[in-house]
Amino acid sequence: MANLKYRILLIVGLLVASAWALFPRTVIERVKRDGVFVYDTVKRVPLKRGLDLQGGMHLTLEVDESKQAVANKSEALDRALKVVRQRIDEFGVAEPVVQKAGEERLIVELPGIDDAARAQDVVQKSAFLEFQITDKTQALEKVTPRFDEIARAAGISIASSDKLSGDTSKKVGVTSLLTQKTDSANKDSTGKAVGATGADSATKAPVQTGGLFASNVQPGQIPGQYIIPETAYSAFERAFALPALQDAMPPGKVIRWGVDSLVNGAQRYRAFYVLDSRPIITGEVLTDARPSSDPVEGNVVQFTLNNEGARRFKVETGKHVKDNMAIVLDQRVVTAPVLNSAIGRNGQITLGGGSLQAAQDLALVLRAGALPVPLKVAEVRSIGASLGQDSINKGGIALVIALALIVAIMIGYYRFSGMLAVAGLVLYLIYTLAMLAGFHAVLTLPGLAGFVLSIGIAVDANVLIFERIREELDHGKSVRLAIDEGFRHALSAIIDTSATTILSGMVLYQYGTGPVRGFAVTLVAGVVASLFTSVFVSKTFFLIWMNRARGVQTLSI
Amino acid sequence: MIRIFHNSKYEFVRHWRLAAGLTLAFIAAGLVTFAITGGVNYSIEFTGGTLMQVSFKQQPDVGVMRNTLDKAGITGAEIQQFGSPTEYTIRAREEKQVASQAAGAEGISKKIETALRQQFGSNAMTVVRTEAVGPKVGSELRQGAFYAMIITAIFTLIYLAIRFDWRFGMAAVISTAHDILVTFAFIKLMHLEVSLTVVAAILTLLGYSANDTIIIFDRVREDLRKRAKGESMARVLDRAINETLPRSVMTHATTLAATLALLFFAGEVIRPFAWVMAFGIFVATFSSIYVAGPVLLWIESRYPRAASEAAGKAMRAGAEQPATPPAKPRSNERAVAR
């Protein structure tokens, strides 16, 4: 019975290998301790849970070309990928995934993230840095009637009580507020860009009367800056998004919101800026950024440019002396100091009363790299850890119940042979899980469902074989011959099942997203394992049984 | 030993008209619902838009929730209770909302969250799940799912074509196609949401259904070889179906046990998948008896094969199988005994 010996050897060998693959092992990973991520050794079963089971966030990012076309997207994405990965590392996430999907997208997976909004900000929102000169041609005033027409046509308006114009006290409030703001904001740069101008623009008459723009927009302290009441913010946001309005923009100009709202007593205001659409430099040329605290200027971020950037910056800032340069971070104006002279390699961003934390955050994203291209979110899925745990629990219950039912059916119906099948099923479970662990497959909720389902399908092979053995026994064949014939005849059908299921699984893997891929992998692993256990392992069990009970005349099946 | 359907001699094929009527009625019902309610109930992944699952501390007023969302500019949101009375799903996928997500998929979900927190208090709720899909990704996933179905179907067809001669292959193909159609009707009638997971269920079914037909057809082929002179094709079919009946029932039972466990215990998220699987398994068994069989019969009657050719073809097609022992005398006896 050398043949049998080898069979047993193979089964046991695979079992040992599986046990080894599934054995809880110590791994070094990032874990959260008291809210801080540290590297630590953790002992756990090496089965990876998908985001839908452990909670976390999945982001699909793509290049945002709405502002300007990007020539070589794939290459830009490669660089963006490095930046995003670096940032996530600094942000602190256990086992993040950042990868390129196709030529146009990045996939970011952040397991265990509970503050999805902040994570997303760090990944995507921050640090596309542009330096743009503010408009001083009063371009907005020229197109105000046209803008109002468009806003009216789109039905955008706000309640009259929110209007600014005609209310002198409010206007004064805005002016004083702005003076205050610019005072701190514009003492800027390493002694090269200093001071606030634009006091004259505040004295300008309100743009016009009637209409969304005419009655709400108030010129700000510096050229190209405009103020609206906070209450009108969403109306303006919608208006700016109108395609017709974008078409009507003065050529070569763009509108950007300021970062924060401005507070004056009970009133809140928003600033927006009209800027030259062409940035003089972008964050690409930035090589370093450091937070710094200064008793006079408050918290600042000092930055350094590379050779090419410094050269261009010097030329451009030289051309625009006495103009205001807006520092635009992710399309929001951080500050807009006056350029007093040309700036070369080193510059400084004043946060205007921002906290040191804010300076550090800004420096971090700038240093970790400004994104070479703006990224936008094409898809986001986030799942709370509690829901994930809930899915695991429920999936586990379903698994146990399915197993209990199947074991009951198999043993109740096939008796002794059923027990052999159940023994095979146990091996099947171990092999499948080991395969998933071995291939570093990710266990997802659909994957869990696929696993439960594959148990049902796995017994199918046994059913086929047993029914065939019964028939052969009916035909009056000896037990030994019947078992032999039963396995042989059922083989082709079992191979068919496996082949068709594996085909479906492969196609699903190709076209599916994360969770469904988990399903496909589990299904295929399950089918492969079941092919082995039902055909090879069960047969071996029968062989062992026949060996021990030689000359047996009956089979409990 | 317990035996079910042992040596049964049901005349399955005779009732094919009734079966055909039933399944056609079912498909028609599906089509009518489709026509009335308009289109398939796609999930967020396919339509684009935003889905949020929110868990409140206390049961919120749905009317207030709806008003809050309307005021925030999220009109026409679908608000549904999900599982427990304090859990709700909110789906925002009106055309303009989906379109606005082209510029950044997260926009709507942020608006919803801000609005709800302002209304109900920021500690009164937790967002347990968010899915925000931009229009481009949505249409790509839709396309991907479509291709996946087509490609799986083609692969399965090719597999069947290689596996059998064309008569069997054709019948198996029609039966599998029937299963998919009926499953779609079921999805429509149950108003299930078609997500990628449901598509995965359909694709799994495609394989399962083809496989179920293969097992019966294998037996038909085997029985054809030992067919008694003058025995009708219908007889052979009935015999093959009866012989494989215990297996069909047992397999059905175990697989159904697994899917029912999923349906009742695995939670709300996976339920549509479990429904489709449970129904599909049932249909697959039904169709391999009542669709594949009669269609095969019809093809055989249209394009009859000579007795010798039949055996030869069957042998050739079954070449990958190990040679079967010569026809057993018993099968002839049984045919005579009938």
Image (cartoon, coloured by chain):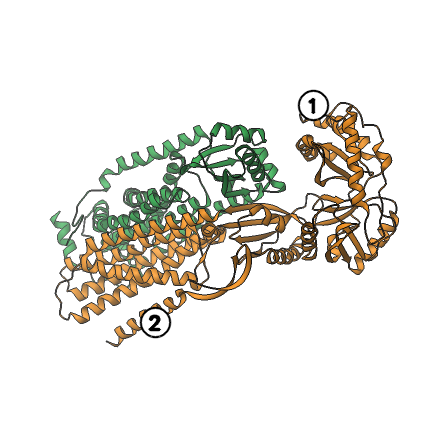
Q: Give coordinates of residue B194: x percent, y percent.
A: 44, 40
On the image, the x and y values in percent for residue B141 come to 52, 45
On the image, numbered disc 1 is attached to which residue? A161
Q: Nearer the viewer, mark 1 or mark 2?
A: 1
Front one among A67 and A131: A131
Q: Residues within 10 Å of mark 2 (few under 14, many from 20)?
A: few
Work out how far the residue at label 1 is from the one at label 2, CA to CA, in angstroms.
81 Å
| Image mark for residue B178 | none
> Seen in the image, is A266 located left or right of residue B121?
right
Residue A74 picture location, percent across and down: 65, 55
Q: Position of residue A429 (x, y in %)?
A: 34, 59
Q: Residue at x 18, y 68 (%)?
A: A546
Mark 1 or mark 2, earlier in chain: 2
Say which amino acid is labelled 2: Gly
Left or right position of A357 against A444:
right
Going by the image, does A495 lie left or right of B329?
A: right
Give a yes or no on whether discs 1 and 2 share a subunit. Answer: yes
Element under disc 1 = helix
Which residue is pictured at 15% across the width and 69% down the height?
A549
- Colour that chain B carries in the picture: green
The chain letter for the residue carrying disc 1 is: A
Chain A: colour as depicted: orange
Which residue in the structure is indicated by mark 2?
Answer: A13
Of residues B334 and B213, the one drawn nearer to the viewer in this rendering: B213
State the image quarter where residue B308 is shown. Answer: bottom left
Compared with B188, A107 (above or below) is below
Q: Quadrant of residue A277?
A: top right
Please give the count of numbered marks on the rendered protein: 2
Task: Please give the chain letter of the residue carrying mark 2.
Answer: A
A522 versus B194 height, above or below: below
